[in-house]
Image (cartoon, rainbow, N blue to C red):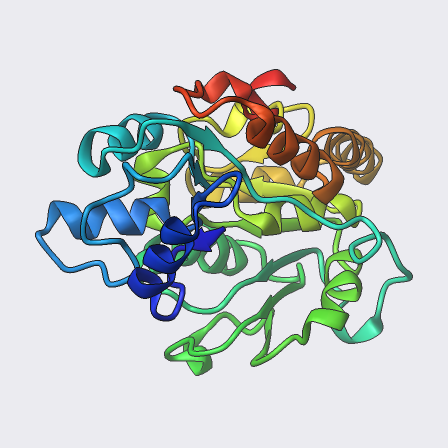
């Protein structure tokens, strides 16, 4: 298996293809980035010079129209989706930590293409909710000193602390990178990690989100600060019930074991066109 952003990806692909193993697989874990760079005429150094036609199977971290684009632009014959996942032995509910205690949280490194949504869905909501506690974990944010006073910032939250971070707030925000939101069917692993910890996710909307969680029952959608404030005003018993629904869906459909089953099923197919419906999310 060769992945996107693999060091020496072209040479590695040639080595694997020339070895003629039982199955050759290219897994693009950054499909929207790959396709947008191709659209702009940029070089994509991890792609083989001849595209992906020689691989028995091409896996995409992103579904929807990305599957067709991999066929059309890169010549992939057999394409399946292998979405993000969570390891429930790593992400689970723990006792809240006073350090991260908040009413609403967000875990993610600063990214320019998430900035507008983060400012609107998180910082503007905090500005409207003085007396409510907000917490952010992530590096490289500009002008943190200008944030509302009820927002606490941690420059770094180490992976072993993620459980405690999520478990210390009833609701947490998910913001999707613009390239992934535009492509759709692009669930971040953070969605599943938060849900596995029993924390209700408030997310921006993108096409295909309802294939992974049911809005209003397992996840809340926010398009502006008012939606976020409304989510924060929900009764905590209701919030806990929705979070429990999301956790159950995650453990049923979005674990590493579930994705491993999907991968084995895809590998067992003969190297002919694989429809997106063979992805686990499509069957869930």
Marker count (numbered): 0
**Foreground: 157 or 57?**
57
User: Along the line of sight, which residue is nearer the eye, 248 or 84?
Assistant: 84
Q: Can residue 232 be seen in this view?
A: no
**Which quadrant would the C terminus be assigned to in this image?**
top right
Q: Where is residue 230 in the image (x, y as percent from the top left)?
A: 59, 37
Residue 19 can be seen, yes or no = yes
| Relative horizontal placement of residue 89, taking residue 23 as reference (left or right) | right
- Decide if residue 218 is on the left or right side of residue 7: right
Residue 228: x and y in percent read 54, 43
Say which residue appears at 89% left-offset and 59% top-offset.
94
Q: In x, y percent, where is residue 162?
A: 72, 65
- Image point (38%, 80%), residue name: 143
Q: Which residue is drawn at 46% across and 29% down?
A: 80
Depth check, front residue: 174 or 105: 174
**26 to 116, vertically: above or below:** above
Q: In this view, does 61 lie to the left or right of 89?
A: left
- Residue 9 location in percent, x, y? 34, 63
């Amino acid at each position: 298996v060769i992945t996107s952003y693999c060091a020496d990806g072209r040479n590695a692909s040639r080595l694997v293809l020339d070895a003629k193993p039982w199955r050759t697989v290219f897994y693009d874990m950054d499909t929207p980035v790959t396709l947008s760079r191709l659209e702009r005429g940029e070089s994509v150094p991890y792609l083989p010079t001849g595209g992906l036609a020689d691989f028995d199977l091409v896996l995409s971290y992103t579904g929807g129209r990305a599957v067709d684009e991999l066929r059309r632009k890169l010549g992939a014959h057999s394409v399946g989706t292998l979405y993000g996942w969570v390891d429930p032995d790593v992400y689970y509910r723990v006792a809240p930590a006073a350090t991260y205690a908040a009413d609403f949280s967000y875990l993610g490194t600063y990214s320019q293409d998430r900035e507008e949504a983060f400012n609107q869905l998180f910082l503007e909501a905090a500005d409207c909710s003085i007396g409510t506690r907000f917490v952010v974990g992530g590096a490289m944010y500009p002008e943190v000193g200008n944030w509302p006073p009820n927002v606490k910032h941690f420059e770094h939250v180490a992976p072993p602390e993620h459980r405690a971070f999520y478990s210390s707030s009833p609701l947490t925000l998910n913001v999707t990178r613009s390239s992934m939101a535009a492509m759709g069917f692009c669930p971040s692993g953070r969605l599943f990690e938060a849900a596995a910890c029993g924390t209700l996710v408030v997310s921006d909307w993108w096409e295909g989100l309802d294939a992974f969680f049911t809005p209003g029952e397992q996840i809340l959608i926010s398009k502006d600060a008012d939606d976020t404030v409304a989510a924060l005003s929900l009764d905590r018993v209701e919030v806990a019930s929705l979070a429990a629904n999301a956790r159950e869906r995650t453990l049923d459909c979005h674990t590493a074991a579930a994705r491993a089953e999907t991968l084995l099923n895809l590998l067992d197919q003969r190297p002919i066109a694989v429809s997106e419906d063979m992805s686990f999310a499509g069957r869930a």
